[in-house]
Image (cartoon, rainbow, N blue to C red):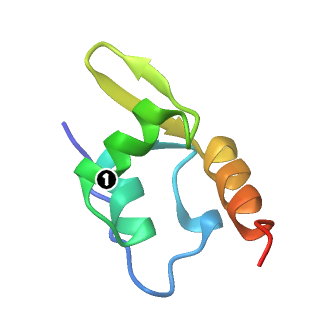
Amino acid sequence: MKTQIAITNSTTLNDLPDVLTVATLAAYLHTTRQNICKMLIAGEIRSVKVGRSYRVPKVFLQEFLKGSSQQPA
C-alpha cells in the first residue's frame, strides 16, 4: 500500500517523513521526478538505492539544502 504525502507551499521539512521517495522529493522541491533521478545519479543529493528505486533520508535532503544555500553568489 502506497501512502501519498500531500505537499503544499506551507510544507516544512518537519512535516516530511524520515525517508522520502523520488516523487515526494520532486513535489517538495517543485521539480520533476526525472530531474530528481538525474540529481541522485549524479550524486548531487545522496540517496539509498532499494531494488530499482531510490530513497532519500531526510538528513540527506537537509545536507543538500544546506549546501545549496551556501553557494557563493
Whether residue 42 is visible, yes or no, is yes
Q: The residue tagged with tag 1: helix, strand or loop? A: helix
* Left or right, residue 12 beside residue 22: right
The residue positioned 24% from the left and 49% from the top of the image is 34
Rendered location of residue 51, percent (x, y): 30, 13
Q: Say what amino acid the circle numbered 1 marks.
A: Asn
Q: Position of residue 69 (x, y in %)?
A: 74, 69
Position of 27 with respect to 13 (left or right) is: left
Read off the residue under disc 1.
35
Question: Residue sitting at 35 percent across and 42 percent down?
Answer: 38
Residue 39 versus residue 28: which sits nearer the camera? Answer: 39
Q: Quadrant of residue 72?
A: bottom right
Q: Nearer the viewer, residue 72 or 68?
A: 72
Quadrant in the rendering for residue 27: bottom left
| Occupied quadrant, residue 15 | bottom right
The furthest residue to the front: 73
In this picture, residue 29 sits left or right of residue 2: right
